[in-house]
Amino acid sequence: MRMRDYPEEEKPREKLMGTGASGLTNRELLAVLLGSGTPDRNVLEIADDILTMGEGGIRNLTDCTPEELCRIRGMGRAKCCTILASVELGKRIATARPSSRLSVRSSDEVAGLYMERLRYEKKEMFMCLLINVKGEIIEDAVVSVGDLCSSPTHPREVFAKAVRRSAGSVIFVHNHPSGDPEPSQADIETTGRLEEAGRILGIPVLDHIIIGDGKYVSLKARGIL
């Protein structure tokens, strides 16, 4: 069935204009991005193939490659670029911070700030948040990127920027690509080593938060810090 044969209220673009983007399904949103189909396939059929190319549905697009998308019948380079650019833009919007500095009052707030940035990463990323005396985030820095199981950290690298920026304290955040945020023994030992280094430097470690898939663990809340 060609799109022009659909009732007006069922066409993705017209539906978006009438009800807003939040009223569209994932396939309809993809159809709007794709713009048009091909002579033998309508745009919703192509959108369905994108959503079913893996078990994760729409989440597959977070690490999909142009080559994978181009294998779908009806997907050319322009359509692939549009979809992947939209995914990246969504990631950046989700992790963008207001221009004013954010005050950190709880582990929930910190986890909320970095959940979407880190939950889909395929490697462990270890970040250090620099906090001023007002409890505001001065800067966040990626200290190290590890393999699927670990992210090597050394107190020298971790605290170098904190010293340069005269941070009053720090918070550590890293992700578990497995999706399970439970701290490993290595996480606990690393945290203890960094806490001791911070004590010597006069830069206390306020918390160490481990990000999983939609959930997190605060080592401070666990009594480890």
Image: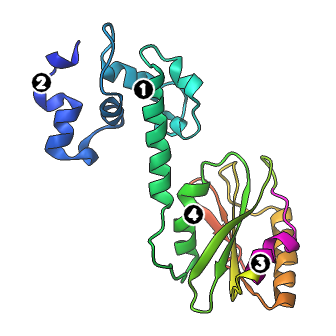
Q: Which residue is mark 4?
A: 114
First of labels 3, 4 by sequence position: 4
Q: Nearer the viewer, mark 3 or mark 4?
A: 4
**Which secondary structure lies at badge 1?**
helix
Q: Which residue is mark 1?
A: 79
Q: Position of residue 68 (x, y in %)?
A: 57, 24
Residue positioned 59% across, 30% down in the render? 65
Quadrant in the picture for the N terminus: top left
Measure the alpha-carbon separation of dots 1 and 3: 49 Å
First of labels 2, 4 by sequence position: 2
Q: Amino acid at mark 1?
A: Lys
Q: Nearer the viewer, mark 1 or mark 2?
A: 1
User: Looking at this view, is 125 or 24 the one in front?
Assistant: 125
Q: Which residue is mark 2?
A: 7
Q: Position of residue 46 (x, y in %)?
A: 38, 20
Q: Which residue is mark 3?
A: 224
Q: Position of residue 156 (x, y in %)?
A: 87, 73
Label 2: how many Cα within 10 Å (few below 14, some 14–19, many 20+): few
Q: Amino acid at mark 4?
A: Tyr
First of labels 1, 2 by sequence position: 2
Residue positioned 69% across, 89% down in the render? 168
Main secondary structure found in the magenta portion: helix
**Which secondary structure lies at badge 4?**
helix
Tell whether label 2 touches label 3 (CB within 8 Å): no
Q: Position of residue 175 (x, y in %)?
A: 68, 58
First of labels 4, 1 by sequence position: 1
Measure the alpha-carbon separation of dots 4 and 1: 30 Å
First of labels 1, 3 by sequence position: 1
